[in-house]
């Protein structure tokens, strides 16, 4: 028996998939992918479609980490303003990076269509604000994205946002028709199934113990070894303790979600009539959407200390009811959490630990789209077309202050100030 997924609404509504036995013995491949989340499954699929022999190992179950637990929101751009990107690259490279972020959300939709992945995709995303300064920030965001030729955005005043989101707390919004939301675990499982059909060999319950440099490189597991010309490290927040060098620039951060009891189609539709995904722009943000079976999925309560709230369900329910008092009579059926990986500057961290060992991490809450893009870029790199991967790799990576021992308390203090600013 393989370890189960963490209990969640997603795990309870996951598509049935075959289990993949742990690796035993030594195998060879062109590429060994370490990590069975969106990044690893997308990379494996892209590589197999190019004709490479791929072995994918996952320490738990496919989609066990953030890929199977997240808010499932598909958002353009990066987790920071493009103005910050522009400080580090030329104008033409900044435009290329922006275009790749748009390609990221489009590539998710392309994969869903091409492989008939049943992951409840719905179009549309709204950023919402609760303070006048949020409204100014959303107007600036629309202007910034517009400079890059991103069309279709609609700024929403208080009356317009309340026609789309049934909460009096929000006074403005920015609607993006190209964003959207998905069932993230089923999307990940769909990518894995497509990769397996393309010839990828998958092993679950097979953590990487270490890797050994060389041509071929060797990935060592508890009961076996994979010798491969290339290695792709795609474990994100769940691999940094095994490969300590990756832990310098990312911080695993806890985030939490609840799923209410089914509300019925009419009541659910009254909350978000056009079924978009919604996220506020508080630094410690809240995000929510409707599920395919008419629940409210409401997330937030970020823990930078990695100490889970004592009662995730009750804490998240209080926040949900603060924004949607009409749900005060609604029960919570599921409550769960997990880690996402953030970087100091919220820019993704792509790079190499050896000429033939690639990694991609640090998606900082924008992983649904950027992970699929990362898989494509790493497959391009293996095939000898590294320009786009290396462009992201040139973005600055900043080690967290305090090292691995003291960075958590240092970050907690910094986030306490951010929380105070959110409250003002």
Image (cartoon, helix red, strand yellow):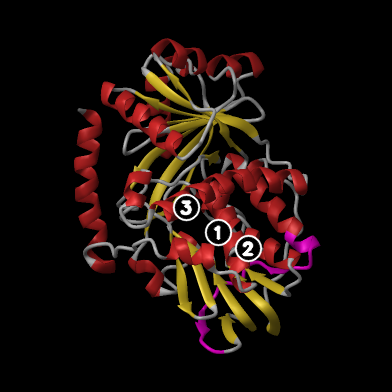
Left or right: 393 in relation to 137: right
Q: Quadrant of the N terminus?
A: bottom right
Q: Are marks 2 and 1 in contact (CB under 8 Å)?
A: yes
Q: Residue at x 58, y 49 (%)?
A: 68
SS of the residue under disc 1:
helix
Residue 134 locus on image (x, y percent): 31, 27
Span colored in magenta: 195-214
In the image, residue 417 sits, relative to residue 340, either above or below, namely above
Residue at the (49%, 35%) spot, across then down: 258
- Residue 113, x across and y down, in percent: 74, 43
* Quadrant hosting residue 348: bottom left
**Lower sequence index among marks 3 and 2:** 2
35 or 49, which is in the foreground?
49
From this viewpoint, is residue 280 visible? no
Image spot of residue 143 (x, y percent): 39, 31
Would you name the residue on which mark 2 appears? Answer: 43
Q: Nearer the viewer, residue 7 or 362?
A: 362
Q: CA distance from mark 2 to mark 1?
A: 7 Å
Q: Determine the secondary structure under disc 3.
A: helix
Q: Nearer the viewer, residue 103 or 352?
A: 103
Quarter occupied by residue 27: bottom right
The residue wearing badge 1 is 374
Instruction: Quote the CA–CA distance across marks 3 and 2.
Output: 19 Å
> What residue is rendered at 63% in x and 66% in y?
379
Q: Quickly name the residue at label 3.
A: 97
Identify the disc placed on residue 340.
none
User: Badge 2: few (under 14), some or many (20 or more) residues near its Cα, within 10 Å?
Assistant: many
Mark 3 or 2: the one toward you: 3
Crowding near the residue tagged with mark 3, few <14, some 14–19, many ≥20 C-alpha atoms within 10 Å: many
């Amino acid at each position: 028996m393989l370890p189960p997924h963490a209990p969640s609404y997603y795990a309870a509504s996951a598509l049935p998939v075959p289990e993949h036995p742990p690796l035993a013995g030594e195998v060879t491949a062109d590429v060994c992918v370490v990590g069975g989340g969106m990044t690893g499954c997308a990379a494996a699929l892209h590589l197999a479609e190019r004709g490479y022999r791929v072995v994918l190992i996952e320490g738990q179950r496919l989609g066990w980490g953030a890929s199977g637990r997240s808010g499932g929101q598909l958002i353009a751009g990066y987790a920071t303003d493009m103005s910050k990107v522009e400080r580090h690259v030329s104008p033409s490279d900044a435009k290329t990076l922006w275009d790749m972020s748009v390609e990221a959300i489009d590539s998710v939709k392309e994969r869903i269509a091409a492989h008939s992945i049943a992951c409840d995709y719905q179009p549309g995303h709204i950023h919402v604000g609760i303070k006048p300064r949020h409204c100014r920030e959303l107007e600036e965001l629309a202007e910034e994205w517009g400079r890059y030729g991103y069309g279709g955005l609609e700024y929403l005043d208080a009356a317009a946002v309340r026609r789309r989101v049934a909460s009096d707390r929000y006074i403005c919004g920015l609607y993006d028709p190209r964003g959207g939301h998905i069932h993230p675990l089923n999307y990940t499982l769909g990518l894995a199934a497509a990769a397996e059909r393309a010839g990828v060999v998958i092993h679950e319950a097979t953590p990487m113990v270490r890797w050994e440099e060389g041509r071929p490189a060797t990935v060592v597991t508890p009961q076996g070894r994979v010798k491969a010309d290339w290695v792709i490290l795609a474990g994100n927040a769940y691999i940094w303790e095994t490969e300590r060098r990756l832990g310098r620039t990312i911080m695993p951060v806890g985030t939490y979600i609840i799923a209410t009891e089914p509300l019925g189609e009419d009541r659910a539709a009254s909350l978000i009539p056009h079924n978009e995904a919604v996220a506020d722009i508080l630094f410690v943000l809240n995000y929510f959407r409707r599920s395919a079976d008419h629940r409210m999925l409401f997330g937030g309560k970020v823990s930078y200390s990695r100490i889970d709230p004592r009662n995730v369900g009750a804490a998240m329910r209080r926040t949900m009811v603060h924004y949607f008092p009409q749900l005060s009579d609604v029960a919570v059926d599921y409550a769960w959490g997990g880690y996402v990986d953030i970087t100091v500057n919220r820019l993704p961290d792509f790079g190499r630990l050896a000429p033939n060992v690639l990694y991609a991490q640090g998606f900082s809450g924008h992983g649904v789209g950027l992970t699929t893009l990362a898989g494509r870029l790493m497959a391009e790199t293996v095939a000898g077309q590294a320009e786009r991967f290396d462009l992201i790799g040139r973005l600055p990576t900043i080690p967290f202050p305090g090292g691995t021992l003291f960075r958590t308390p240092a970050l907690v203090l910094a986030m306490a100030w951010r929380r105070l600013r959110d409250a003002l």
